[in-house]
Image (cartoon, rainbow, N blue to C red):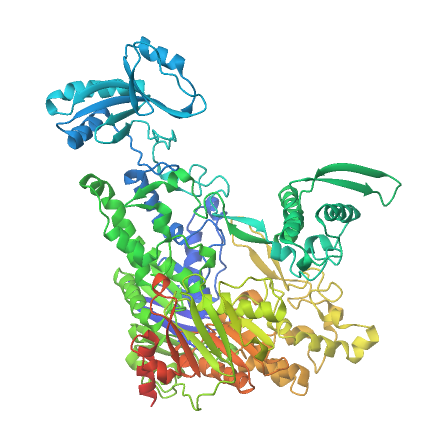
Amino acid sequence: MNDKLIIRGAREHNLKNINVDIPKNKLVVITGLSGSGKSTLAFDTIYAEGQRRYVESLSAYARQFLEMMNKPDVDSIEGLSPAISIQQKTTSKNPRSTVGTITEIYDYLRLLYARIGTPHCPKCSRKISNQSVESICESILKESEGRKILILASLVRRKKGTYEKLFEQVKKQGYSRIRVDGEIVEIDGEFPVLDKQKWHNIEIVVDRVKASWEEKSRLYESIQTALKAGQGDVMVLDTEEKIFSQNNACPFCGISIGELEPRGFSFNSPFGACKTCHGLGVKMEFEPDLLIPDKTKSILDGAIVPWSGRFSSFRRQTLRDVGKKYGFDLMTPINKMSSKQLQVILYGSEEAVKFSYESQSTDSRWEYTNNFHGVIPSLQKNFAETDSESKREELSKFMRETPCNTCKGRRLKDEALSVSINSLSIMDVCDLSIDSCYEFFKNLQLSETEKYIAKSILKEVLSRLEFLRNVGLNYLTLNRVSSTLSGGEAQRIRLATQIGSNLTGVLYVLDEPTIGLHQRDNAKLIKTLTKLRDLGNTILVVEHDEEVMRSSDWIIDLGPDAGVHGGNVVFEGTINEILKSEKSVTGKYLKNHDAIKLGRERRKQKGKLVLKGAAENNLKNIDVEFPLGMMVTVTGVSGSGKSTLVNDILYKALSSDIYGSIDRPGRHKAISGMDEIDKVIGIDQSPIGRTPRSNPATYIGAFTPIRELYSGTELSKERGYTPGQFSFNVADGRCFACEGDGVKKIEMQFLSDVYVVCDECKGKRYNSETLAVHYKDKNISDILAMTVEEALEFFTNIPSIQRKLQTVSDVGLGYIKLGQAATTLSGGEAQRVKLASELSKRDTGRTVYILDEPTTGLHFADVQKLLEVLNRLVSLGNTIIIIEHNMDVIKNSDWIIDLGPEGGDGGGTIVAVGTPEQVAQNPRSYTGQYLKRILKNDS
């Protein structure tokens, strides 16, 4: 059997016909500069071929349901094992998908609660049990042995009436005593007279017997009789009342929950899901602040946004008459109205209003009296009844997700939420952090029978929770919706799930699993990867993290540079061998020869933003000062509250104040110091466009001057071409056959969809008339095919284009093509394109830039370039606030705000603040502990 994966002649994308030998059953790292071809080798060549071979082995019928992959451009791949790809993609946009469902832990919890859960009445919270006559007898003998007890059959529980007929029936059945409202009465003579307006409790006295083993047969018979008369319920009166039931129903409230089944705990099943929200836990509700964002406006000025564009005569006259009734007119600003008047406008009137309506087109006039329904109920009706997707999309802008009023966001029916194990419902358990959840199940208090039933289920639950802890996700909760997970979190969840599957002989291909991980948690992740390897698998990791490289068995370094200058194998071998390599840039950084040095003094602050009482998610009502005019890094272990503090509170609060944004900031008391800034810019890793037509040139604004340049050529002027002629989004200039895509998709049913170059334009996207226009012997299609570096040289004498392209090169993206589809850019590349776009704009020196892990996907050399760009921005007087785990960025920042000390419930407090040197001296800070070592090495 071949002990190597042998790749020969790999030419996909920028790979230069390379040959690579990868040892099997080892942890192998592929590294290199951004754009050097790492992902192309790992995913687009090796994994793609593995997936293609698997799919081709299936029947034609099965293949039509699967996504097919084109054969990669490679001569041969030998020794390829079944391949599984685990990438940085959010697992699912489905709101029903949670951490619990992805990992299958929730499936085991449903089974556990159905088998050993204790049901309680949803109304009165009393324990509900389904007992046999034998078990009822044993309970009575155990708790009341040696004492006289009354056995009662419950007939009426908290109901109004006089019940003469019931008393008559009881007497005919041969009973002589009953208990009415706690008092035992004889019914041989006259029946008790009851007040029909009051609630009553009525029970038959079946027997008065001593609870002893000698009397067990009599006790058994009396209980059987009482259960029959009481329709499955029996009451035993000793020192206190005890009720036993055979109905799985509350004998006090009469609520039946039926037999417990796993499907009853599923929020994806009608048997378990809340009937109001159908298991989503949330409802879309119209938000008053979104409907009326500017309260200084009057109704006539368009204060009610969804009604402002088409403010019909009918609505105007309706609101006029409502105003007459409640004391306002259409010119009254909203902020001058009373709270009652605003409530009437939004939610309608309880009292009838006299309306008069005059038609604008005829002389007709109507008068009628009715309640005013209100803006929000009217919009809700429109939203529910419309068949127009665009209408629903338009209305949804004025809506926010709010917890369901029925289940309070818990997704399940009351009956399921009332079942507990050790006092916690299934949703209580899902609300716990992974760490707390693990401890809960590890220390469950169960009876011997329950332990026997739950043994195999608990084994599966605990093992999966342990895997999640080992990949640094101990702060997550099982009910966390998967669409809110970062790419790194989603990838590590899938990694944990794969470890639980115990597969062997598999090739796992991973994309930067350390993204979003603090240095403290890297050791756990590496241990997880080595455990997966030791099961008999090959682990192929695209990675830049130093610790992962040092723990690997084999390293493949691609380069030497990016884009067309990359795609070669610079080095392949062990960690000790790469440290001796003169060619490998990675080796030099690992050896500390090219370590990223500070090279400057820490800056002094020029003011500060003060955030008071931050209490969103797990933040513990903290006060935070963000110094201005500095590079500030917010650090802390995963789940400590960094994103909540910076993105959910600070960024949204600043956007709301500066731009009037309607995004509501997270909970906080106040923010001050905003008069010292005039702009806030959030630069995240979301795509720069959703379609292949979106590209870097368009996003940074370079394509407009390029099109203007081409429209100014002599031939364009002769033909009367405008800049629109050179846009592939406009029909005039683009190819009519492929509509500017350059390729055509041919659906092949059960074979892979084939993308063929458009035979009209030969992939150039434009029609022949447009391509006839040249500038310096290049047409517009040739320009889009250029890399940023090539375009910089080509447009060297045109400042308007040069300036914009230079910023893209400065952030380390000189290798990407101007016309590269936005959908092919990684999250890190998209973030740097956005950063480049901001760099090219005119600067005020009073801007706050907020970045979330900008080093994602960056090699050591690329981090150096990024830091140079960020320092350039700060040197102009701006402020940069970065959420980051990369120690090179952290040590080069001016100020650190370290949150923690742990993730989830154990985080949300400030552990340390100050310069890197100050934080390094704080023994409570995990970040400080790692900083101390690094600063010592640099000195």
State how many labels appear.
Answer: 0
Q: Is residue 353 visible?
A: yes
Q: What residue occupies the far left of the structure in this picture?
A: 214
Q: Nearer the viewer, residue 676 or 153?
A: 153
Q: Nearer the viewer, residue 722 or 44?
A: 722
Q: Quadrant of the N terminus?
A: bottom left
The image quarter in which residue 87 lies: bottom left
Residue 848 shown left or right of residue 145 in the figure:
right
Q: Is residue 397 visible?
A: no
Q: Quadrant of the C terminus?
A: bottom left
Relative to 447, does residue 713 appear above or below in the rendering? Answer: below
Percent of width and height locating residue 378: 66, 45
The image quarter in which residue 863 lies: bottom left
Residue 206 shown left or right of residue 560 in the figure:
left
Relative to 829, does residue 605 appear above or below in the rendering? Answer: below
Q: What residue occupies the far right of the structure in this picture?
A: 363
Q: Nearer the viewer, residue 490 or 556?
A: 490
Q: Nearer the viewer, residue 321 or 426?
A: 321
- Residue visible at 42% across and 48% down? 58
Percent of width and height locating residue 243: 28, 29
Percent of width and height locating residue 727: 70, 69
The image quarter in which residue 116 lies: top left
Relative to 929, does residue 826 appear above or below in the rendering? Answer: above
Percent of width and height locating residue 189: 31, 9
